[in-house]
Amino acid sequence: MTPAEVPGSATSLAEVERQVELRTSERFIASLVPVVIVIMILMAGTFWLVPGGQISALVALVGAGAFGIVYVLNRRGHRRAAAGSLAVIALFIPLFEPATTGNLSTNGLFVGIATVVAALVLEHRRQLLALAAGGVSLAVMIAVTSPESTPPVTRQGSLVSAAALLALVLLIVYALLRTFNEMSHRAAAAAQREAAHRAAALQALNSELTTAIEQRAAALNEAIGARQALAAKLQESVVRDPLTGLLNRRYLDENITRFLARGASVAILDVDAFKAINDRLSYRIGDQVLTQIAELLAANVREGDLVVRYGGEEFALLMPATGAADALVAVEELRAAVGSHDWSGIRPGLQVTISAGVFSPGVTGPWSAPDFATAQRMLGRADDALHRAKDHGRNRSEQLTS
């Protein structure tokens, strides 16, 4: 946010000061002009009763009407139009009324009043123009006054009294303008302090809102992280066997083609006589045996190979980029790890072995880049090799290469 947009900045405070000056001027004029109108109406009535004063009475009534127009324009915010109306008054008096009556002193009062109100209506930097216009109006009034309409003595006295009255009016104007300007500056200073206070309050509120938004964002990110972790855990639970902790058949089906590229081997490992373990020792013991076998396979499988729970007591082993000889060696190491394990921790005297069927196709031919169907046929061939191992006495590995 730029300084001009921040409440309390130099730009906004200047605008506040201008608005305060406008409102103060409007209120001041709204209070002063009705008093002037009343005075001019009273003067019109007085002139009407004086012999030969009917023209002055008419001028006073016209001036009262003009000040009424000024009042309306000022209330509606048309300050320049109001000042223009006062200019009409100031021109009308010296060009018409003194030429017929020679009443310089009274008309000097009219000009002074018009000058005062015009100065107050105008903006501060144009007030000197109003004072200068008042002086010019008086000079014009003296210049156009007809000597034939006023005796010399009366004319001289009228000039002196008009000059004195105008000087008095100008002093009053100066005092009023000084008081008015001081009021405007004080009001502007108060507005500046209020604007600065509001700016500080707004900045504090913005800081609080920023902190609240940051806290909310942190809480939202934490919630999103928790949901993502939960989603990952749910996804993991879908593809992981709850008993053994190994990846399951679903994961194997979704990813098997990534592992079985050119030169890959597969194997199916089956627990020997597992039904007898369940029937003779209980399903609880059978579950413990499967869990222990899963731990042994995961601990001894080669890096890059994948072992999954294929179903029941069967496990599948995928061996990327592994030829027939190396595949058989890898499977034999796993079979030996299971056979040599001490199973007495589960049940004294318990002995568990596994049989394995290995399929290692050549690097060329229909097995070189398997799709899902080809991968399933490779597993089928490994299962055929497993049945051959079972038929040959169990606790052994058999391998097929075609």
Image (cartoon, rainbow, N blue to C red):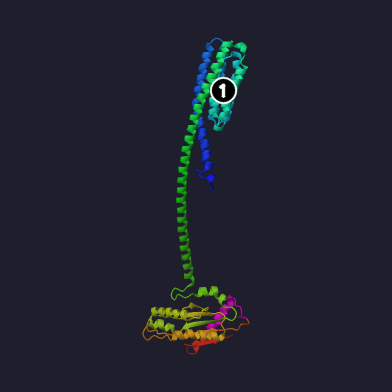
Magenta stretch bounds = 366-385
From this view, report whether residue 54 is shown above or below residue 18. Answer: above
Residue 318, horizontal then vertical, whole percent: 53, 79
Q: Name the residue carrying label 1.
A: 66
- What's the amino acid at mark 1? Ala
User: Which secondary structure dominates the residues rendered in magenta?
Assistant: helix
Mark 1 packing: few (<14 Cα in 10 Å), some, or many (20+)?
some
Residue 51, horizontal then vertical, whole percent: 55, 9
Residue 54, horizontal then vertical, whole percent: 56, 13
From this view, report whether residue 238 is shown above or below residue 292. Answer: above
Residue 220 among those drawn in magenta: no
- Depth check: give the residue in front, 1 or 242: 1
Q: Exactly how many numbered labels are in the figure? A: 1
Instruction: Please state, as top left, top right, bottom left or bottom right, where the C terminus lies in the image.
Output: bottom right
Can residue 177 be seen here? yes
Q: Secondary structure at mark 1?
A: helix
- Depth check: give the residue in front, 203 or 217: 203
Residue at the left extreme, as displayed: 348
- Depth check: give the residue in front, 335 or 107: 107
Residue 373 among those drawn in magenta: yes
- Depth check: give the residue in front, 50 or 365: 50
Residue 237, horizontal then vertical, whole percent: 47, 70
Can residue 27 be seen here? no
